[in-house]
Image (cartoon, grey):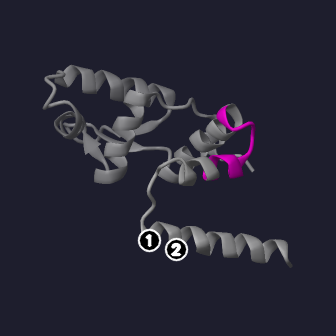
Amino acid sequence: MQGKSDNLPKPTEAELAILNTLWERGPSTVRDVHEALYREDGTGYTTALKMLQIMHAKGLVERDDSQRAHVYSPVVSKASTQKRFLADLVQRVFDGSPSQLVLQALGGGQKASREELEEIRALLDRLESRISR
């Protein structure tokens, strides 16, 4: 079943940075987003405003304009966005093979923490129990 977010355009890298800020901080004003992302590098407030306006037009964020300062919220969840990008990555780079992605990620010099390995083992156990049913 396709969700509402499946019909939205895939966010660009800059849009993903804004979405990450909104996912982390919750609903935010343009000033909040500007302070979180652009203040250090000197990018202007109007850049943050324009990006949020574009994202609103694309349907990636909602805007509450009931207050003087508009407040933006993500329309898409972090989990659904990650799944969407991952599915695309698996298709384009790993010939549709999720196992090749996992093998490359875990065997290619990337270090997983003990907690992450325990989560992976638990997931594998759940997947294996579904197969043996």
| Up-down relation of residue 115 to residue 100 (above or below) | below
In which quadrant of the rendered view does residue 17 lie? Answer: top left
Q: Is 14 left, or right, of 116 in this rendering? A: left
Magenta segment boundaries in residue numbering: 93-102
Front position in the image: 44 or 115: 115
* Up-down relation of residue 41 to residue 79 (above or below): above
Q: Nearer the viewer, residue 36 or 87?
A: 87
Q: Is residue 117 above or below residue 65?
A: below
Quote the CA–CA distance across marks 1 and 2: 6 Å
Residue in view at x 75 percent, y 51 percent: 1
**Kind of residue at disc 2:** Glu
Counting from the top left corner in percent of width and height, residue 105 is at 55, 49
Secondary structure character of the magenta stretch overall: helix
Percent across and percent down for residue 73 are 37, 44
Badge 1 vs badge 2, beta-carbon distance below 8 Å: yes
Query: Residue beneath label 2, please?
Result: 118
Q: Is residue 123 magenta?
A: no
Residue 114 - label:
1
Q: Is residue 20 left or right of residue 86?
A: left
> Horizontal and vertical percent for residue 102?
62, 52
Please tell me which residue is depicted at 17% across the width and 21% down the height of the picture: 44
* Residue 33 in picture, x, y percent from top left: 24, 37
96 in the magenta segment: yes
Q: Secondary structure at mark 1?
A: helix
Query: Residue placed at 44% from the left, 71% from the top?
Result: 114
Location of the C terminus by quadrant is: bottom right
Secondary element at tag 2: helix
Is 56 displayed left or right of 5 in the figure?
left
Of 57 and 20, nearer the camera is 20
Q: How many marks?
A: 2
- Mark 1 surroundings within 10 Å by alpha-carbon count, few (fewer than 14), some (14 through 19), many (20 or more): few
